[in-house]
Amino acid sequence: MLNDATDAREYVARIQAEISQEARRRRESDPTLATLEREIGQAWTRSAPSGGAAAASSDATAPAEVKAHAEHLLGCVDDLSLIDVDAPDGARRGVRQVKSAVRRLTRWYLRYLADQVNAFNHFLVGFLRSTEQRLARLEDDAGAAERLSAFVDPVPEADHALGRSVADQLSQCSGPVAVVSCGSGLIVSALLQAGIAAHGVDDSADAISDGVNEGLDLRVAAPLEHLSRIADGSLAGVVLTRSVERRRPVELSSLIDEALRCVTPSGRIVVAVADLSARSGPEAELLRGMGLSPQTWAHLLRRRGCAVEVSASTGSRVATLVTARPQ
Amino acid sequence: MSDITFVVPRYGADVVGGAELGARALATRLSADGMDVSVLTSRARSFDTWADDYPEGTTIEEGVSVSRFSVDHPRSPNFAASCDRLLRHPEQASMQDAWQWIDEQGPTSNDLLEAIAEVDSGVLSLTPYMYHPAVRGVSLARVPTVLHAAAHPEPPLRLPVFDGLFNSVSGIAHYSRLEQRLVLDRFPSTIPTPQAVMGLPVEAPDFEIDPDGARRAFGLGDEPFAVFLGRVLRSKGTHELVDFFNAARERRGSGKLVIVGPVVDEIPESEGIVCVGPVSEQHKFGLLAAADALINPSPLESFSLVVLEAWLAGTPVLVNGWCGPTRDHCEQSGGGLWYSNFAEFEVSLNRLLDDAGLRSGLARAGRAYVEDSFSWPAVRRRYQRLLSQIS
């Protein structure tokens, strides 16, 4: 008996894994199945409509459109590679010597080429292996902080009071506002209630699902990537909150650059984060090097040439809001 | 003076098509809730020809004011050739060629465009993205517009002509979050545009579902069967399904596939396939309830009403794993299975046809998902929030 949606999702995932395993086993033990699959695939490729074939193909690695192009190409190659039936043969006078010389030259040239290619490949493989090892070490070092942060509770959702405080800061904005790390959308909802068009973005699909169900415009995306795809000056405001408390300064610097690029000259950037001093002992140690205090946010934004205002928030966890206006 | 005016290529109780059904579902429910709802559409029933099947003029249908306009010409005989030429590399098409494709695609009706330009109150709701009325009409709109794109990962979406449409509308209503991702990837300039992942209202019918009656009506006997419901179109994967089903049936020795819906592309006759054509709503739900599974083989869906209707009828579903929105429904609800190749199709089909416990567990989870997320109050709440942002 399934108790709730989570149980049902896990149940289907398990059944689906069993089906994939069974399908693999059958394919391995039953050679006719592989032949049958190939025949069905070929029949489908032949009959698939123009344009729709690629999407309709059930073979993701080789869409039908690609296969069709490849088949056309192979046909062309076939046409070009017909044997010339009038090729000179060794029975003609002098031809035998010429052919022998051509063969020797060809052999020498191919061996020379092969040696060069082998040497280059050898170097390339060595270089790629050493690069991969260095990258793995770097990723390991860089990821150590993130791994530790998994032992800390997630950043709590914004409360209604914080939503209203943020909306007050953006009340002069006419135009869309993006809320970075929106969670279930309380800040987005507060902005909409204040008559400000807003959408939210969060990297967790689970975090936004309740808000999406309520009709809030919340989207799943990495914050930096989301902002980087927005055209210059097309937002009236950007709100940075929640997960920005768990990002390293170098990422936050990029986030500020992108936010400044996205907002209009009269736009606003609002940073709603808790003070670092509010972290508990374990949080402070496990999140070392992550997040910035509101004062440091204000400093960074001033250094970027913004007029910055630091104001009190009525939110229970976030006591201070930093509001920046590009100048 | 309508609160909302839907612009849709075809409209009517007997029109088959996802976006058209979606528009009608919204229009009739909004009207029943007291909104003043209008529809501007062509007289066509079939998108193959755009022939003027319905009478011209305005009628009231289920509380909705429906105005139908004659098309200026039937679908161009060059259209198939245009598709072949243009859709191989749609992103390389010139604007001129792309506009010509839209005009050939139709339904082209100057009277319909004039009617769009005359709407001076409420919101214009355009659907789907790919047809002449939406693409040509958006620039004539004098009121805020919301686009129900019904976009799939299909070649026409890459034509340059659609940038203007997506960038001009005041808001976008998506059928699924995967459709939203597709649109945002293709048109990143729409990121600041107000949007909602709205879905469509799906509710159990108000009549008693009669599975035994449906079995009798179509002579299906007691043999287990799966059902396909929709237009029989190559691009919707029907022919691949027939091939898969025939091969699986030959190996398992039993089972039928009942194909319900208008046949656009003929399918070859075979022993296990029963093609019943279009049926009434009563028989549709009867067949859904009687079936051991609904199979939706389409790789191109933006929502798939029929998958959700199957859950309401107490039937699990099997969908094409390459279709994001239908697979997402199954993953989110735990109400269905998906296949990515013949071997998986065969194993899934066998399990669904042979395991009653699995069928009832899946169907129950699917029904809970539909009732939670796609009841009319839930969809209306999302739609009204979007409309309030743009109007």
Image (cartoon, coloured by chain):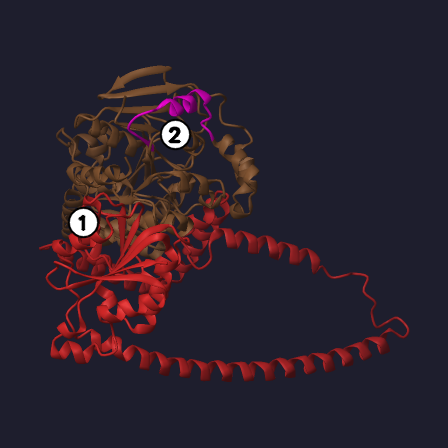
Chain colours: A red, B brown
The residue range painted magenta reads B106-125
Q: Nearer the viewer, mark 1 or mark 2?
A: 1
Left or right for A280, reference A73: left
Query: Where in the figure is residue B167, as x and y percent of width and height?
Result: 41, 42
Q: Chain of mark 2?
A: B
* Residue contact at pointers 1 and 2, CB within 8 angstroms: no
Instruction: Name the residue tied to disc 2.
Output: B141
Left or right of A138 on screen, residue B161: right
Eyeballing the image, is A306 above or below B54?
Answer: below
Q: Chain of mark 1?
A: A
Query: Gap in Å between the C-alphas at discs 1 and 2?
Result: 30 Å
Q: Is residue A276 magenta?
A: no
Q: Residues within 10 Å of mark 1 (few under 14, many from 20)?
A: many
Q: Picture quarter containing residue B211?
A: top left
Residue at point 20%, 29% (across, down): B29
Disc 2 marks which amino acid? Answer: Ala
- Residue under numbered circle 1: A190
Q: Residue furthest right?
A: A93
Quadrant including the C terminus of chain B: top left
**Relative image position of residue B17 (x, y in whole percent):** 34, 33
Q: Residue at x 37, y 36 (%)?
A: B128
> Total number of numbered labels?
2
Magenta region includes residue B118: yes
SS under mark 2: loop
